[in-house]
Image: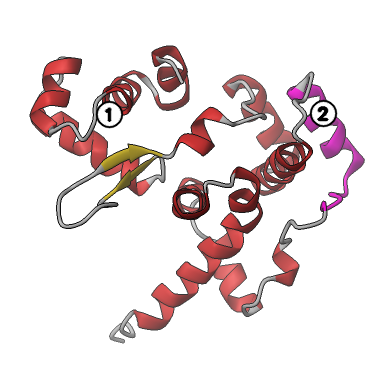
Amino acid sequence: MGLKDFIAALGRRDGLIMAAIASTKNPTNATIARMTGYSVRTVQRSIKALVAEGWLLRGMSGGKRRLAPAPGLLAKRLFDIPRDDLEYLFNKYGRERVSEAIRVLEFTYATSRARPRCPLAILKAVLRRGRLIYPRGYIPREKLNTTQEIVRAFDALPFKEKEARIRRAYAKLFSKTRDHASSLARAEAFAIAEFARERESSPPRAL
């Protein structure tokens, strides 16, 4: 994935920093700062944000810090819809419905090994149809092995936080399996399961 692709996906600051990490083996913050022109403090903030949002993996090897982009999510994205079109669809159909449709389509095309000729037209057609058809192997949310209370609580999270959790889950699965389709199929279920474990381990709030 090239520099322009990183900047398009992440914005200029985070895109430059991600490109520096991708092109250098285990760079220090100081090295990344020299490569990008940003301060070490800015690099630290960017890395923290990239890890939190699931674009970057950290601590993968031993006690020393290791940084690596989640390449499957970035390089194999088949439904990278332009931001303006995506916002229009969010407003028309709702963020949840559009995001789930994109995940289903990503999985469908990943397993078919075909590339969509016109991703935006395909996405619009699926949304107009009104009902998602889940491909074999995909895990729809109604089949998740958890309570509806947990699913509703997960849905109540701010959209950006929920998508970040799903990206982090995808990145963890992909780092283990190196299988894009399998990671996409299990990402939301994995994210909700981790969310449920966090809720169970959190101490009750004082009244």
The region drawn magenta spans: 119-135
Other residues around mark 2 within 10 Å, as few (<14) / some (14–19) / many (≥20): some
Question: Is 133 one of the magenta-colored residues?
Answer: yes
Task: Examine the residues drawn in magenta and state their main secondary structure.
Answer: helix
| Amino acid type, residue under disc 2 in the picture | Ile
User: Residue at left 74%, top 42%?
Assistant: 111
Which residue is the site of mark 1?
Answer: 21
Question: Vertical placement of 197 versus 81: above or below?
Answer: below
Of the residues tagged 1 and 2, which is closer to the observer?
1
Is residue 20 one of those drawn in magenta? no
Q: Secondary structure at mark 1?
A: helix
Q: CA distance from mark 1 to mark 2?
A: 34 Å
> Quadrant of residue 51 in the image?
top left
Q: Nearer the viewer, residue 36 or 11?
A: 36
In the picture of the structure, the residue carrying the numbered disc 2 is 122
Q: Position of residue 187 (x, y in %)?
A: 57, 55
